[in-house]
Image: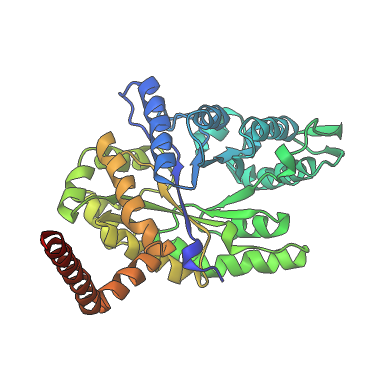
Amino acid sequence: MVEKEQLRFGTFMPPIHPVGENPTLCLERDLQLIEHLDRLGFHEAWLGEHHSAGTELYSTPELMILAAHYRTRHIRLGTGVNSLPYHHPLILADRTMQLHHMTRGRSMFGAGPGALVSDAKMLGIETTRQRDMMEEALEIMLRLFRGETVTYACDWFQIKDARLQLRPYDNIPIEVVTASMFSPSGPRAAGRLGTGLMSMSATAAPALAAAGTNWDIACDIAKQHGNTMDRRDWRMIGLVHCAESRSQALEDVQFGLEQWVQYFEDVAVIPMVPPDRRGDPAAHLIESGMAAIGTPDDVIAQIEGLWESSQGGFGCYLITDHNWARFQAKLNSFDMVARYVIPHFQRQDLQRQASYDWVRAHQKDFKASHEKASNEQVERHARELKAREA
């Protein structure tokens, strides 16, 4: 079990920028967003890897992480995720370890099979093999992270007496998570290899229905391999746009929601809105529970539902960066979450409220004491004035 007050917050940045915008400025705005989140006290930012379709622009999330590191102070930064079948595991492990040092231990490592079929096709990789290739590579990388010398050969890479030159920064182990969609393959891999778990599209109906079961699967597999799963290392990814009112939130997302929906129809393998609901995608996302588009109370309700579905809680809630709204409205959305949603779960106002309630309950006594003190000062002044006149 995890206590709600331990819940961390962050963002998951694929990213998704419509074709037609200046890509240089898109990358710069993403870095500005991470700076903003750092100032607001968000805990994490995860940045993806993609190589086709012109929309998800990070081919090398490590470059973005390093740039963000030098522009921020506290927020932790992770690859969300590296597509392991696209890399030789020794080279990726070496690069990951260097990044860990250059970020003074703030960087994290996310592993996945690769989300876009088009990326795999360009590399000549069969889609049916990607999950197995990811697990094969990740197992080798984890051994390298632990300082082992590894010899291994398979049909797509080989290493001989391979080892890393560096240990983790300050001997802080690199935090590793395995990405999962709706199937049990991700939880099985996390349990077998002893990593954290990142549940993609966690607010989608299939993911909600399977959340608790998939965690149980991860724990069962972990036990078989001598590992222990920790709910604090479980990250849930959802969709949010927050504003001062529901009407304002709905108005905000009219800016870019249609392009976002079209992207998933044209490129991704899982459309986000069915054809019969294309006329009002925001309403569908809200009614299905996939997205919280509204006030902080709506966001709180979404996370509470996700918490209940998890059957024991999770460690971090990640808000997908989707560019539904104009940049300033997006910044305001994260600001609203920081001001009202995070304090709700972390009970940051618990002692403030208790102090307020205590003062309010004794207000009459305090008022009487104040009046008594004031009257005594008035009487004292009168006596001193009378004494001087005498």
Q: Is residue 372 visible?
A: yes
**In percent of the image, x 64 and y 44: which residue is there?**
129
Relative to 315, is 371 on the left or the right? left
Q: Position of residue 324 (x, y in %)?
A: 28, 41
- Which quadrant is the C terminus positioned in? bottom left
- Which quadrant is the N terminus positioned in? bottom right
Judging depth in this view, the residue of 59 and 118 nearest the camera is 59
Q: Residue furthest front?
A: 390
Q: Position of residue 31 (x, y in %)?
A: 43, 30
Instruction: Specify the color scheme.
Output: rainbow
Relative to 310, is 319 on the left or the right? left
* 236 versus 152 height, above or below: below
* 184 versus 308 height, above or below: above
**In percent of the image, x 15 and y 69: which residue is there?**
379
Q: Position of residue 174 (x, y in %)?
A: 68, 44
* 362 versus 260 height, above or below: below
Residue 144 falls in which quadrant of the image? Answer: top right
Residue 356 falls in which quadrant of the image? Answer: bottom left
**In percent of the image, x 38 and y 22: which residue is there?**
23
Judging depth in this view, the residue of 351 and 106 nearest the camera is 351
Q: Position of residue 361 (x, y in %)?
A: 26, 78
Judging depth in this view, the residue of 150 and 299 nearest the camera is 299
**In percent of the image, x 66 and y 35: which residue is there?**
100
